Image: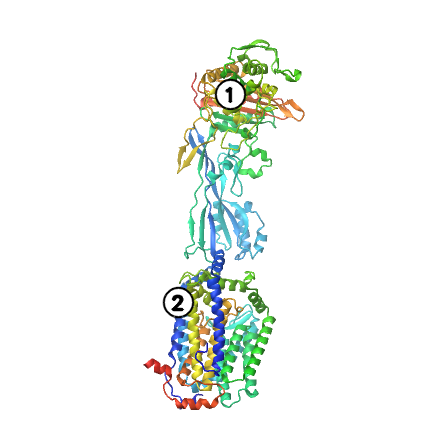
Amino acid sequence: MPSLQQGVVRKHKPDYMILLFMGIIMMVGLVMIYSIGHQRANVLNNIFGTNYPEDYFFFNQLTSVAVAVVAFFAAFKVPPKLLKKIGAAVLVAGIAACLVLAVAALVSGGEGNAIANCTYGACRWINVGSRSFQPAELLKLGLLIYLAIFLGARGRQGKVNESETLLPLAIVSGIALFFIVVLQRDLGTGVVVGALVLSMLVVAGVSKKILILIMSAAVVLGLIMTVAVPHRRERLMTFLGGDSSSIEDDDAYHVTNAKIAIGTGGLLGVGIGNSVQATGYLPESINDSVFAIMGETFGFVGLLVIIGLFVILLSRLLKVTYFLHNSEGRILVAGVFGWIAAHMVMNIAAMIGLMPLTGITLPFLSYGGTSMMFVAAALGMAFGMSRYTAHSPVIEGKESDESSSSRRRVGRPRYASRRSS
Amino acid sequence: MFLGLQKGSRVRILAAFLFVAVAAIVVRLFQIQIIDHGKYVAMGESEYVKRLTIPARRGLVYTLDSGKPVPLVVNETIFTLFLDPKIIDEPKKIEDVIKKVAGGNITSDIKEALKKTDSRYQVVAKELTRKQAELIKKEKLAGIGFQEGTRRVYPEGGLAAQVLGFVNGEGAGQYGIEQALNERLKGKDGRLESVTDISSVPLTIGDKNINQPAEDGENVVLTIDRNIQRKTEQALKAELDRISPSATGSVMVMDPQSGKVLAMANFPSYNPAEYNKVKDAALFSNAVLTNSYEPGSVIKTFIMATGLDNGVVNPETTYYNRDYITVGDCGKDCTIGNAALGHTGNITMQTVLNYSLNTGAVTVAKLLGGGEVNKSARDRIYDYYHNRFGFGLKTGIELYEEQGIIVSPDDPSGANVRYANMTFGQGMNITMVQALSGFSAAINGGNYYKPTVVAGAMKDGKYKAAEAAEPVRTGVVKPATSDTLRSMLQTARGTTLAGQRDEPGYRIGGKTGTSETITTSGYTKASTVASYLGFGGGNTPKYAIMVRVQCDGLSLEGGIHAEPVFSEISNWLIKYMKVAKE
């Protein structure tokens, strides 16, 4: 896809800040898992009679990080041309995986079987040997690549706001959301997909009118989906009930303990290894709730640093988008931004009672392989795109700028030049 | 906010979304972590700081056996069995095992308890022995837990039950020494405060952990002698059995030289190990201390002591006995008669005691008033009865006691007739412990000791006797008065049948008492309280004994129904205490 530009913007060094901050966040995550993993093992062993070694979770997470780093560099190495070819394939693979899961889930009657891994009737995971895999992540990646290419191409043709663009977009997104939200009952991931697509649409140059229309539709749809499903309604009630809701409800208990963990942390936190909430009070302490444990451990200052790390990482993605003249590439990077930002915001907001609980992971910090691997792959692609930035920004709607400005300043991007000085 | 992005760039929209979201998050975090920090710390503590009480071991109670402490009340570890229905996976087996091992201890329906699956604590059996608990533990069943507790065990059975009292289900001492010395016996519970994980396993996290060990209760040694107590209970029971199945009685044995209570027995009694089976709470009371009554003629000892001490009479002092005597000028109402008739004419004060003549006792009162029972006589009697012998005053014994009533000489109801009646023990209410404590002072040379049941404490297996108590009042009577009184009591006992029951070579002193009881229609002779008050051990009395027996509807007499108990105990004590012949 960037073939048009390849002659124009010379491929330069990628934005290493992306790699650096992803690495820092991963390291923080490892430290966290190292400090609370043994407690997690104890809790599970005591309550469920499992037999996890104390360092089980740490080494598993280390493996996940290694896999994620490999995925990151693999995605980075994929030539843009190849990306264009495999986009549709990845999407189809994602849909296929979801289909397999849906069928397996149907066969199992929501109880789970050798293939479908179900919790409380929601089947979101496919069992792969002793591990499991979340097809929605693959679907997200497929959607990201495919829509980036699709929208990029349409954008160059100036047809972004036309129905021949919007209709296929709606159909593809609709299929993805149907699998995720309806079949897998995963509204959280659905919202992430929505954010991902919307982010791409924003930089793809879709008119503000249509954007507002889509967002309104999404909100209405989301509300309907929420009210229609009992467990989501409960989560919403828990959320609206705030601290006054009774702690007996599982979600309320979860949120209350997350807030206790964060609130207990105070300004500077209780310190590594001193988390009490991680000893079994806070559910999912190493997965979805790791932010709360970090709040307890590192306090307000620590959380600001962690949020800061994400903000810097996300800002780098915005910068890449801003300076990337290749349509497909910039839409893709915007999608990656939407993906990571949605995960971060939804995870944290749920922990502090700003949003209902959705079970969304905190990228690179939450325990678990699938999510991290795919986010890393997406980020790896963005990292790859960062090699094609120009000096001048792209102002959407000024198509003529694209070629002339980049032509004027062929050469090293400012990141590269800064680094070499 | 826009990262230096130019106006018009769509990236600014994304940046704005991120900024708003992050700003909201940071504000909220500031609220939770900084503003509401204290609130969440408190919520957290209430969630994961567990406060455990380490129960203090209740002190043991010892009795003496010829001066050597032996345990009378000990503790036994028992277990309360509870179920955690939430995690139970073998309900049938659990039910079977509990029924097999501890069938008799089951307190609530196991099936019902097992149904409460959202509960984590269901007590189904109580008071299991260690062995039972271990048998159940051996089955390694999930969801069964034990709570350790203790229960009081009584190696001597019901011995001295009313002295001891019992410990109720809440661990509080009730009645007797258990209640009176509850604070000393119970010790101080320790505290364990710890941050725990969700399974209540203590963590080493934080600085809120408190570990304050329990201070065990004091081991108390009673002055009660095991053998004397047993003999006393047996003697009382045997006599009451002879009188009537419904007869009741009390006996107290005291060391007159120290106020130490050697035995205190009441019948009927109860077994403190089965206190919860007792239907009539009156059984728990120690009637020696709590049943104040009109003591009757045993009190003539005290009016005689008052007369002797004031020098108005001696054993040879005579008066003319007409078998009745008039007090004041109120006619028939003021005439007092004798119970034992026929000893008329000029008789001595010794004869008065020998035959328990009311007219003689009133005569002493008259002599105290210079010829009439008047204000001066009343003041003197009150001074001795109340201020010196301690009648109508709490003795200060460690146990719960009644105060009794001695009407003040200045009280309108404290008229001359009442005081005349008080010379032979009517018109006043006192307890046996008051009578025996006062009696001890009257015969030991005039030293009033506070009666006590606590001899000392056992600490680390060693008996530490309390320091010998000083008398609370000295000079209650002159030593010479004491000498004369003892002699008169010995003579009085010796002239009756009772004296023939004594071991040859010993001079035992004593005085009978038979008091009419008050019913709604006044004094009645149909039900009388028989008593006997005496001592043994010669010029340095070794023991003082008071016996009281009664039975509704029976007219009991001191010399016939109470005195045999005294004789039985007295003769046995002579041997037990190795009292020397005079």
Q: Position of residue A211 (x, y in %)?
A: 55, 81
Q: Are marks 2 and 1 in contact (CB under 8 Å)?
A: no
* Residue most extreme to the right: B521
Up-down relation of residue A90 to residue B452 (above or below):
below
Q: Which of the pair B137/B33 is nearer the observer?
A: B33
2 and 1 marks on the same chain? no
Up-down relation of residue B178 to residue A120 (above or below):
above
Give the letter of the chain under mark 1: B
Q: Which of the pair B234/B519 is nearer the observer?
A: B519
Determine whether the residue tagged by mark 2 lies in a helix, strand or loop. Answer: helix
Determine whether the residue tagged by mark 1 lies in a helix, strand or loop. Answer: strand
Q: Position of residue B499 (x, y in %)?
A: 51, 16
Q: Position of residue A72 (x, y in %)?
A: 41, 78
Measured Cα–Cα span from mark 2 to mark 1: 88 Å
Q: Which of the pair B91/A91 is nearer the observer?
A: A91
Which residue position is annotated with label 1? Answer: B534
Viewer can see residue B287? yes
Q: Which of the pair B455/A70 is nearer the observer?
A: B455
**Could you tell whether A391 is left or right of B511 in the image?**
left
Q: Position of residue B253 (x, y in %)?
A: 49, 26
The quarter of the picture where residue B116 lies is: bottom right
Quadrant position of the C terminus of chain B in the picture: top left
Q: Amino acid at mark 1?
A: Gly
Q: Residues within 10 Å of mark 1 (few under 14, many from 20)?
A: many
Q: In the drawing, what numbered circle is on residue A31?
A: 2
Up-down relation of residue B97 to residue B399 (above or below):
below
Give the letter of the chain under mark 2: A
Q: Amino acid at mark 2?
A: Val
**Could you tell whether A412 is left or right of B164 in the image?**
left
* Residue most extreme to the left: A421
